[in-house]
Amino acid sequence: MSTAQGSIRIFIVDDHPVVRAGLTSMLGTQAGLEVVGSASSGEEALNILQRSGPDLLLLDLRMPGMNGIDTLRAIKRAGHATRVIVLTSFETDEDIYRAVHAGAEGYLLKNTSQREMVEAIRAVAAGKRYIPRHIASRLAERMMRSSLTCRELEILKMLAKGLTNKQIGHALGISDNTVRNHVNSIIEKLEVSDRTEAATTAIQRGLIEIED
């Protein structure tokens, strides 16, 4: 695809056609920016990236099939030079942490102003990182917290479903006392006062998802 010399070549990955069309229209009016294509899924984006190397990707997090985090990891694993800004409606602590940990150079919400979005695109294309202050502070808090273990996340999901220590112990084949120790560890790591608050906080931060 031909582009104006010196322009930032942008590729959009989002499963909503209205979002793709809106971003293409909005960014296309900005001097020095050119939208060179779009994809509706992570799989489609990876196939196109193998043939063409845009400067910057605007990547949605929640998509059917390959989600944004898996797409981002695949892009980085493949060694593509394309820089990535996550553009999403979601801002749980865990979404932010996973995106940055997977290699995103920027993180924006879809309600970001046009001025800030253009500023972020130019900064990231120039080799900088762009994370708005309120998101950066939440990322810092998340990174300071000790990571929960797989077993603790498993127990958190059971707490959220209202299971007692005895029921959790029976389901996992461990003693009530071991469950109690895990619950105490969870409460300490999440800096909450009890098991109910631990479950609520974990859901709010995106640490666990409760299946219907």
Image (cartoon, grey):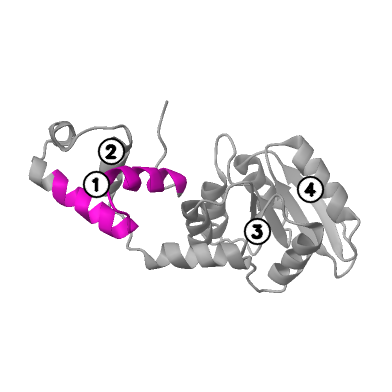
The number of numbered discs placed on residues in the rendered structure image is 4
What residue is pinned by disc 4? 37
Mark 1 and mark 3 lie on one chain; the one further toward the N terminus is 3
The Cα–Cα distance between marks 1 and 2, rounded to whole angstroms, is 12 Å
Quadrant in which the C terminus is drawn: top left
Residue 67: % across, % down: 55, 42
- Numbered disc in front, either 1 or 2: 2
User: SS class of the residue under badge 2?
Assistant: helix
Q: Which mark is residue 69?
A: none
User: SS class of the residue under badge 4?
Assistant: strand
The Cα–Cα distance between marks 2 and 4, rounded to whole angstroms, is 45 Å
Q: Tag 4: residue type?
A: Gly
Mark 2 and mark 4 lie on one chain; the one further toward the N terminus is 4
Q: Is residue 176 left or right of residue 42?
A: left
Q: Which residues are magenta?
A: 179-204
What residue is pinned by disc 3? 85
Q: Residue at x 61, y 68 (%)?
A: 133
Q: Tag 2: residue type?
A: Leu
Q: Tag 3: residue type?
A: Ile
The Cα–Cα distance between marks 3 and 4, rounded to whole angstroms, is 15 Å
User: SS class of the residue under badge 1?
Assistant: helix
Q: Residues within 10 Å of mark 2 (few under 14, many from 20)?
A: many
**Is 91 one of the magenta-colored residues?**
no
Q: Residues within 10 Å of mark 4 (few under 14, many from 20)?
A: some
- Numbered disc in front, either 2 or 3: 2
Q: Is residue 105 above or below residue 201?
A: below
Residue 76: % across, % down: 55, 59
